[in-house]
Amino acid sequence: MRCFSLAFACAFLATEFAEATSPNPADLAVVPEIQVKARALVRQLGSEDFDEREGAEQQLEDLGRLARAALTAGATTNPDPEIRSRCQRLLPHAIALDTKARLDTFLADTKGEYEHDLPAWKTFRSVVGSEWAFFGLSVWSDRELDAAARRVFTELVSTSANRRLLLAVDGPRTALADLVVWRRLDLYNLRSVRTDGEPREPTLEDVTALLFAESGVGSQYMLQRRGSTSSLMSESGFTRAVRGKDEKSLVYRAVLIAWLDSRDESREMSQALNIAQNLDLTDQACGLAARLLTTSAINPSSRGRGATSLAAIGSRKHLPLLNKALTDTLTVYTVRPVTSTGEAEAATYDVQVRDLALAVSILLTEQKLSDYGFVDRFGTSSSADRLSFSYTRHYFPDNAAQKAAFAKWEKWCKASE
């Protein structure tokens, strides 16, 4: 039995090696005879005979990825607890070998001739936008962009650390979040911990893989944050790659945009806003600025900063982003006007989120804040200069002025429909 098992294993190891060099994922299919044998071995895991149980387990381990389907069924649906337990113990190894075989097949498909069922690859394609699918079927693809996406993805999975991260993208959010936190910290440590006398900067592939993985994780899953992803971008050459003009640059830009759009924590949203503005990604910057202003969980100063940024870079098409903030009465800042002698007045005036949303709306429609009753704390005219607007500068002198301003804005909106 033992000799047969070893011969059986050697034969299939040779088969797997041959299959791994083929670019066609269809060559990874498990022949019916092996499926039947694997299912029979799973049943033997519940045998009353010790040698039969142990022999079956060893043969299933030797089968590796070829036993994945049988082990999955045994681990999830078999009524025998002994069989379920043994299958659950063997299954991770089979999954790992199956994933490796699929990955090797993908890497061998250098011409992109085949469709691959590889973890994270479909998600990566959807992020890049190189393919549109409907009910799982490809209905359109940009061949040049898709080829670039394939090249980038191949580069990402070329190192074990990045591969480990990517293969978790389609799994549970909590597990992915743990890996993201670990990888982020690891990249920071590499810069400071010297190996052979020199620190190692993160590579373009390192940062691209991290951003792609992070874009699938919300802040609620990342309670232990370490370091900032944004500071890794310039050091790795990622920002330079995003500014490029070739197809691969479009891939990097798409990954960055997915990361920017997924930020939902105050500090990271602020950092992401800086990145988007520096890279002239105006729509993403406006979206971040609007979310900073309109998200109730964000701290007041960051909400004010969102208003200031949106006033500077937004346009009329961004007005809908401000609508839900027009009723938010949270106080963002308290103004203490300065007198002609340079001293602060005793009176103070609260600036609410809705005041900022209204002010930005007025500026984006090229109107004057002073026409709506806003007062400039420095006493200068409140023109429609969007670049000079600040959430700490303009306020309403009283409730009546505030009420009149909102009524005027509502009237203007109706007249502009």
Image: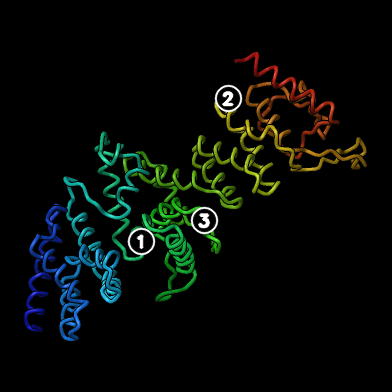
Q: Which quadrant, please, contains the C terminus?
A: top right
Under mark 1, the amino acid is: Asn
Instruction: Give the left or right position of residue 96, taking residue 19 as reference.
Output: right
Residue 372 % position (x, y): 76, 23
Nearest-to-viewer mark from 1 and 3: 1
Residue 114 % position (x, y): 17, 47
Under circle 2, the secondary element is: helix
Residue shown at the point (27%, 49%) measured from the top left: 151
278 or 255: nearer the viewer: 255
Per the image, the residue denoted by label 2 is 316
In primary-sequence order, the first of circles 2 and 1 is 1
Nearest-to-viewer mark from 3 and 2: 2
Instruction: Give the left or right position of residue 93, taking residue 285 as reference.
Output: left
Residue shown at the point (50%, 56%) measured from the top left: 229
Per the image, the residue denoted by label 3 is 231
Residue shown at the point (35%, 44%) measured from the top left: 251
88 or 249: nearer the viewer: 88
User: Contact, CB < 8 Å: mark 3 with mark 2?
Assistant: no
